[in-house]
Amino acid sequence: EVQLVESGGGLVQPGGSLRLSCAASGFTFSSYWMSWVRQAPGKGLEWVANIKQDGSEKYYVDSVKGRFTISRDNAKNSLYLQMNSLRAEDTAVYYCARDTWLVRFDYWGQGTLVTVSS
Amino acid sequence: DIQMTQSPSTLSASVGDRVTITCRASQSISSWLAWYQQKPGKAPKLLIYKASSLESGVPSRFSGSGSGTEFTLTISSLQPDDFATYYCQQYNSYSFTFGPGTKVDIK
């Protein structure tokens, strides 16, 4: 059974940093692209970033470029999102998702809430 | 970036109704469109990919159609478990934009 479990969310002040993790199981993690998708409270979905199987390609939505870094550790079956210079508008539930070119996001984690507030 | 719109934003329907949701892209995305269902407090669930392919395990009352810039999601006979918010998403190009969502509630 495919499982994705996010962790690392919490309350952080504007300008602060946070690192999210996503632990994957039930599939060959190293064979898939992976993505982060976020959802602000009461709002719609926004794709944030994705990373190729070997980490050699990474893409970001414009609003997080230069502030967020996606990475992965295939030996640990884990995906990460390092978030720096956080802003109030980054407040959201962050989901990790398995990412395939044919179907896009076929499995999602339960999400972790990031709140940026003073 | 490609912009996605959905209509209606809210839809009130009864169990057994046929429901259709429309999604439009600001430019052609071929058939690179997915539909997701989301219930409150839960992660989205993939229903349809490549515009009309049904994800494994999804009931056959869900169907998708369209190509280019106009797409539809149809629920042939609405069931109690289907009251939720539905999002379309283009994956023809970055940044894989989602539509604003259509909430299906009880009439």
Image (spheres, rainbow, N blue to C red):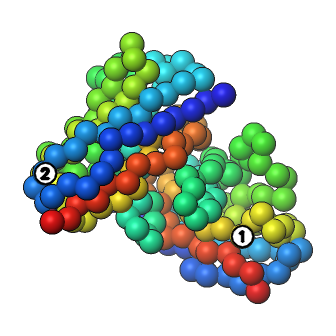
Q: Dot 1, how many residues are within 10 Å of its Cα: few (below 14), some (14-19), or many (20+)?
A: many
Q: Amino acid at mark 1?
A: Phe
What mark, if any, has residue B83 been given in the picture?
1
- Whether discs 1 and 2 lie on one chain: the answer is no
For the point 16% across and 46% down, the residue is A17
Q: Chain of mark 2?
A: A
Circle 2 Cα neighbour tier, 10 Å, few/some/many (<14 / 14–19 / ≥20): some
Looking at the picture, how far across and down is residue A111, in whole percent?
A: 46, 48
Q: Is residue B4 left or right of residue B81?
A: left
Q: Quadrant of residue A81?
A: top left
Tell how many labels: 2
Would you name the residue on which mark 2 appears?
A: A16
Q: Given contact means CB atoms under 8 Å apart, are the residues at marks 1 and 2 in contact? A: no
Q: Amino acid at mark 2?
A: Gly
**Whether residue A98 is situated above or below residue B39 in the rendered picture:** above
Question: As rendered, which of B51 and B16 lies closer to the eye?
Answer: B16
Quadrant into which the C terminus of chain A falls: bottom left
Q: Percent x, y for residue B75?
A: 79, 66
Question: Nearest the camera: A16 or A105?
Answer: A16
Of marks 1 and 2, the one in the foreground: 2
Residue pictured at 61% horizontal, 56% vertical? B36
Say left or right for A48 vs B71.
Answer: left
On the image, the x and y values in percent for residue A30 come to 45, 18
**Where is the N terminus of chain A found, in terms of image quarters?**
top right
The CA span between labels 1 and 2 is: 38 Å
Q: Nearer the viewer, residue B97 or B93?
A: B97
Q: Position of residue A55 (x, y in %)?
A: 31, 23
